[in-house]
Amino acid sequence: MSKNIRSINKLSRNLWWSWDTDAKDLFKNLSPLLWERVNHNPVELLRHISTEELQARCSCEFAARIDKVTKRFDEYIEEKDTWAANHAPELVANPVAYFSAEFGIHESLRIYSGGLGILSGDHLKSASDLGINFIGVTLFYKEGYFRQYLNNDGWQNEDYPLQYPESLPVDKVTTKDGKDLIIEITIAQSTVYAQAWSLKVGRATLYLLDTNIPANEPHYRGICSRVYGGDQNMRINQEILLGIGGVKLLEALNIDPAVYHMNEGHSAFLTLELLKRELEQGLSLEDAKANVKSQCVFTTHTPVPAGHDRFSRDMMHYTFDKYVSQCGIDFDDLMLLGSEDPNNTFGLFTMTVLALKLSRCANGVSKLHGEVSREMWKHLYSTDDPNQVPIGHITNGIHTRSWSSGFTTRFWKKHTESIEDLFSSRESAEAVLSKVSDNELWCLRYRLKRSLFDYISRYLSNQLYHQHQFTPYKQAIDSSRLLKSTLSPDVLTIGFARRFATYKRAPLIFQDLERLNAIINNTEMPVQLLFAGKAHPHDDAGKDYIRQIVQFSQQPQFLGKVIFLENYNIGVAKRLVSGVDVWLNNPVRPMEASGTSGQKTVLHGGLNLSIMDGWWCEAFNENNGWSIGDGEESDNYDEQYRIDAGKLYDVLENHIVPTFYDRDEQNIPVRWLKHVRNAIETIAPVYNTDRMVKEYTLRYYLKVPRI
Ligand SMILES: *Cc1c(COP(=O)(O)O)cnc(C)c1O
């Protein structure tokens, strides 16, 4: 094999390529069509190209580019003078072990469902960029999360294409003598076996546990089928594998973490395995708990009581009976660890409670969510005063390099050495922007919108062609009419895409169809709307929201002006956040713990329009986007719905639409672009995972916090 082929293979096996525009283009240019067909998966792409072709093309057409990218990659991996080396050398010596039920790293790796996973993936990438020794732990889901397609009425159906290790950049974890590394865990009365895969994400490693091996009974093989699939029993088994299996895996690999980070309560059983270890050393339960606590930190993500994982005493007893005897702890002591009431072990076992009780610090994911969490859990700390509750907050961010790659990165690179200047500080962002004219910014917006609309047009015609049976448009309209009448880049374009959890209220903007019609079909100042999102397979109310929007999109006055794109995922998200003018977010406050999708639009010159919830409460300053209302809350869902919809129309009619269409003599929306500049200067430097991971490190990961 020639050196160039080895290099390109090496690049394909580290997800670093996913945030390096040149590396990505290298793969894409090998065959743009195949690249689309394999869902941007370089391992799969290379499997489809013969060695002869690779040999021929890599040795001349691509030789210089492969060299250049490989050199940058090698330098990245070997860099010693990192932020962590200078600010947290302890975390270069021993790793942070970060446990999460899902990781959203790239669309070709379907081991995520939504925002929680994207956050884990972005955390991993920034930890790598900062030089922290960082290990992620999750499950290898053979079926992943579902692919969404809609039937004629707009009802969501799911299908579960399999993902195979051979097609992914994962390596089987083996022992020193080359055998598969197998760990054993106890579930109910059974021993369950798991192998593991490793995946490289820059300098970080992600381990994926996998019970889908012949040694297991079929129902235990199924633990690793679907992200959040199955019933409560499946859920508890997945969580045992993640938490207990994860700790055992790290032990088998001789990895000694400086700290265990539980990202959401799913992984909280890891504390039990740590407890077991301490008890085996002969410690008392109290001392063992104290030691476990000193090793763990916990991030909660759920601002509603119903959103937390809870298991019945019966289920706990069935599942942990044998395990507790192995641990040497009393079953009631176990129940107490997850009980909200210190005097009652007969209630439910709550994963968040376990995590809170056995971690040295805990946090919510925005300032408001920190407050909500302190209020929600104060009874655990026997206090009425939320300020006494030891739950802080670290506001979520995004991995800016990933979410701004492609044309946007190239655009900014024309104006500055490194795109980091846009998000490392407000001052450096201002300095870059001072070199960019309104004309250039407006050109960027047009270019990105055009590219999104071309993509949508291809996407929709594929949808119409491949899924003739299922297309929602089939009965309502003839496909060529849809494609002809579709989207114009001159028109103010609003995007809404996220999981269709009902609290996010996707159809809010349709509350008053007449008023919406007047906004969309205003002849001077029209508006168009793009939607995408999946409902959880068991969530019929969420599916009904999708159906409603699809049916609105088929009404004659909205045809080609309201579009629903099937199968929302990271790839679709990247397109949408870069192309739209306005990113809409209208959850029920305070249920959006943070939200991150709006942060992704900023460097592309998009603006946020959001309820005062999650991160937006902190970020909004009246000049960097718009708010819907000012943070009022009501207990009456329907009333709040009407009020928020009214405020949404008000701000669109009175502010957003007129500002967008207010043009100077060169037809440039000068006032609009002032908002865009302010958004970049005030949002990009704060709401990114570099800032976020630094905060986790200095406040939470280090034994002695530095800030
Ligand atoms: C960013 C992102 C999310 C998170 O969206 P929010 O609703 O803002 O939390 C979910 N899914 C995908 C695919 C994303 O890219």
Image: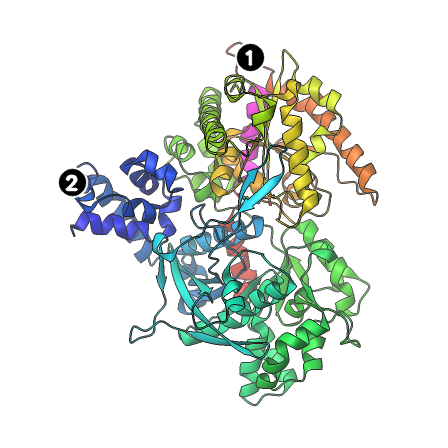
The secondary structure making up most of the magenta span is: helix
The residue positioned 17% from the left and 50% from the top of the image is 3
The x and y percentages for residue 503 are 71, 44
The residue under label 1 is: 664
Q: What SS does tag 2 mark?
A: helix
**Amino acid type, label 2:** Ala
From which residue to which does the magenta span run? Answer: 669-686
The residue under label 2 is: 56
Which residue occupies the extreme bottom position in the image?
282
Mark 1 vs ligand 1: CB under 8 Å?
A: no
Which mark lies nearer to you, 2 or 1? Answer: 2
Tag count: 2
Whether label 2 touches label 1, CB < 8 Å? no
Q: Along the line of sight, which residue is nearer the eye, 74 or 448?
A: 448
Quadrant for the C terminus in the image: bottom right
The x and y percentages for residue 609 are 64, 33
